[in-house]
Image (tube, helix red, strand yellow):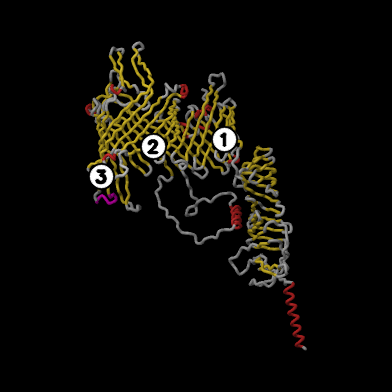
Amino acid sequence: MRQLTLYIAIILALSFVWAQKNTTPRRAPLKTSASDTLTKLPDKILIPDSNGILKDEGIVLRDSILSDPDSTTLKPIHLQDSISPLQGADSVPGDSLGERKGFSRIIKEKVDLDNALNFSAKDSLVLMGQQNAYLYGDGNVDYGEFKLNSAEIRMEMDSSTVYAAGVVDSIGELQGNPVFRQGGDEYESKSMKYNFKTERGYITDVITEQDEGFLLGSRAKKNPDGSFFVEDGRYTTCDDHEHPHFYFQLTRAKVRPKKDVVTGPGYMVLADVPLPLALPFGYFPFSEKYSSGIIFPSFGDDYNRGFYLRDGGYYFAINDNVDLALRGEIYTKGSWGISAHSSYVKRYKFRGSFDISFLTTISGDKGSPDYSKMQNFQVIWSHQQDAKANPALNFSASVNFATSGYSRNDLNSYYNQNFTENTKSSTVNATYRRPGSKWSFSATANIAQRSQDSTLAVSFPNLTVTMSQIAPFKRKKSVGGERWYEKIKLSYSGQFQNSLTAQQNVFFKKSLIKDWRNGMRHSVPVSATFSMFNYINISPSISMNDRMYTSKIRRQWDTQASREIQDTIHGFYNIFDFNTSLAFDTKVYGFYKPMKFLGDKVQMIRHVITPTLSFNWAPDFGNPMWKYYDFYEYTDQAGNNRRVDYSYFSHGIFGVPGRGKSGSLSFNLSNNLEMKVKDENDSTGSRKISLIENLSLSSSYNFAADSLRLSPLQTSIMLRLVKNFNLNLSATWDPYVYKLDANGSPRQVNRFRWQEGKGFYKLSSTGTSFSYTFNNDTFKRKKKEEKDTSGTDGEDDEPTEEDSFSNRAESRRRNKTGDNDESSDADGYAKWDCPWSLSVNYSVSYGYGEFDKVKMDYKGRWTQNLSFSGNIRPTKNWNFSFSASYNFDLKKIAYMNCSVSRDLHCFTMTASFVPMGPYKSYNFHIAVKSSLLKDLKYDKRSQGSNNIRWY
């Protein structure tokens, strides 16, 4: 009986234990410590199915003190519906090994959420019942397009509401402020409340970036359409938005992200000082599209023209390929101007820009002696064709045309480096090269201006037809060696030109028939090259030229008026000439190896001599049989008979054949000198140094001339001084002496200088020019830097979208001011870098000046031009630049322009001034950097007329 009773008791006890395990889980108190406040949750949650059977749905809750030491971030909990209250949330079973001792039941229920709600936390995640969740330490919430990152997050699922705020660290600073993103826009705040269902929210101290500016609001309300209502807000383009250098204080505002900001009354604050610049309302448009708009003008005053509004107008966004900006300017004393700028581009086709401006300048009062009215205009056009657009046809344009008074009347020209330019040139060219053909066709228009005397030289149209060199006698199927006649080659060039040179004010009054010079020219050079003794090249050639003019001028002496008269005869005239030559050339090499006691640094010196000897012959085209020249005779006031020879076609655009038979022997001697030295840094062990790149001498002797048979000696030298700088110098040497003719003018006579005891040659002309830029790297020694080829220790996994958003949020908090760490040296000190540059342009020429009648020789005259420009940046934000030119005749600086600029973080300041000369003036400009507020600026300028000397 006892055994039966014991057996029944054991069965009842086991039944009770089994019933307890399958009905109500046991509860155990949470284990916490002072150093670890993380709540320990069940390792795994089992969810019953429709039949009441518990199944593992893969939802895992990790404890922060589990055995995996590398896992410090909690896995996200994916909840598709709602979470029922955890049974016994205050007594989660489990031992120190993390083994499951009980179950929590999560019942699936249908809730009103449109998207899956994903959340995670870095430090801890606490679920309080079924409806509440707490996230501590870099918490992330992801619901559709809404993403949130904050140090503390609280979720209330019954009301679909999330709360987020930052935390105060040990030193009292607020860290981990909420950063949320929705619809591509990111916002930062100190605290926020958001409802997933209604998509409304309440935010404090919000910071959002819109286009180029930042909007800060003490209190903001988010609407379901994504817009915000902001109270007590600030708008600034300063990226230090926590403490901006300037901002607009706004009472209330409505923000439509990526569209606009509309504000109520507001005022400007500069350096925390409110300014009396208040606005009843404000509108800040944002547009990511290409759109038209108003260009706001700048205001100021000019001494001569009065107060003005300048550079205001309208911008037309015509399409994606063309735009147009119309601007105007008006002055209170009557001056005005208008300008248009257009840029155009066609991808893989062409690109360019077009500027045209017109100015009417009025000075003085009407009716006063100093009253003047001038009209000037300027046209600038640049066009470039893409090389891939049409390999056969190319069109280009570079036009810079302005009337002579435009630069002096345009206020913006005073501080331009090109202000002192005396000449301007413009070219428009179209060239067609037929594919697979030797022929090419081109049309060109040229305009050259000289501002000093308002001279225009226009050449239009200019047509050119060329044929590249061909071998007309070369066999199509060569058998054996090349025949001598197959080496004969010829080419062709044909030109048509039409030009006129006149003053600007009378240019359009000139006659197209009488005043314009035009003509055609055909040129056919024929040449061949043969080798003699394998060392000497023989090159015979003949060049035939044909000029075509539509008029000729006959001259005669008017005995009654005692002057020359000219009679223009129109018609078609052909002027033909030719010349032949026979040239011999070769190369002679000389080598010199220095003796061993001089060292082994110099391995070899090489001298290359290229002599050329040629014979040229041409008939006398002044012979009457050619009908190119004529003469007339007259008796001067002294009763002497005079004869004047002239050419009918001296006015021709391509000139006229020369007079006198030519049978000259010419020589040319070119030299090149190089040195080979040892260089351990070179892969070959040596390198070449150019001592003299080229030294040439040339002259000729005309056997057919009756006098002055020896031509001047021409010399030139080119030296490669440094890697990127070559010095070129050329000179002409005169072998004859000069005497005075009957009129007292110096004439060259047929007598050599050595016969008069004046040496062999006299320098008649020489000149050179060079430009060079000095900078920080000019005087530094080149040091080879070893490249770091070491790779990273490991490969980082590609971050997920959630991780990248969290990283961006953390980076946003750390880099609020946008300051970058300056580079430092090996000792940890910041490097001080002072970039600078100095450009020097110098040209010098020597020629004959006045004639010394005592020494019966010309005096020399030097002409020099010097211009220089430079800039220096002593600090990161300061920049100084200048440009100047020096007049050697007056021995003073002719013009100087200086500029000082300062980067004021969100402002830029520039001061330009001309310290000397007739255009002495200054210009001060300070403006906001952002293009959105570019009209928020201040300009102050003056002119030389401001400093009038009254006595």
Which type of secondary structure does the marked residue at label 3 adopt?
A: strand
The amino acid type found where label 3 is placed reads Tyr
- Mark 3 touches mark 1? (CB < 8 Å): no
Nearer the N terminus, badge 3 or badge 2?
Answer: 2
Q: Residue 325's mark?
A: 1
Residue 600 position, x and y percent, is: 27, 51
Q: Position of residue 268 (x, y in %)?
A: 64, 40
Q: Quadrant of residue 250?
A: top right
> What amino acid type is highlighted by mark number 1?
Ala
> Residue most toward the top?
560
Residue under label 2? 439
Residue 854 seen in render: no
Separation of residues labelled 3 and 2 (CA atoms): 40 Å
Q: CA distance from mark 1 to mark 2?
A: 42 Å
Up/down of 787 relative to 934, above or below: below
Q: Is residue 131 left or right of residue 632?
A: right
Q: Amino acid at mark 2?
A: Trp
The residue closer to the viewer here, 435 or 855, is 435
Query: With 474 as the anchor, is 268 left or right in this view?
Result: right
Q: Nearer the viewer, residue 102 or 238?
A: 102
Q: Which residue is mark 3?
A: 589
Q: Which residues are magenta?
A: 596-603
Please tell me whether residue 602 belongs to the stretch shown in magenta: yes
**Residue 427 coordinates in the image, percent (x, y):** 44, 33
Q: Secondary structure at mark 1?
A: strand
Q: Position of residue 445 (x, y in %)?
A: 44, 31
Does residue 162 lie above or below 665 as drawn? below
- Considering the image in quadrants, where does the N terminus appear? bottom right
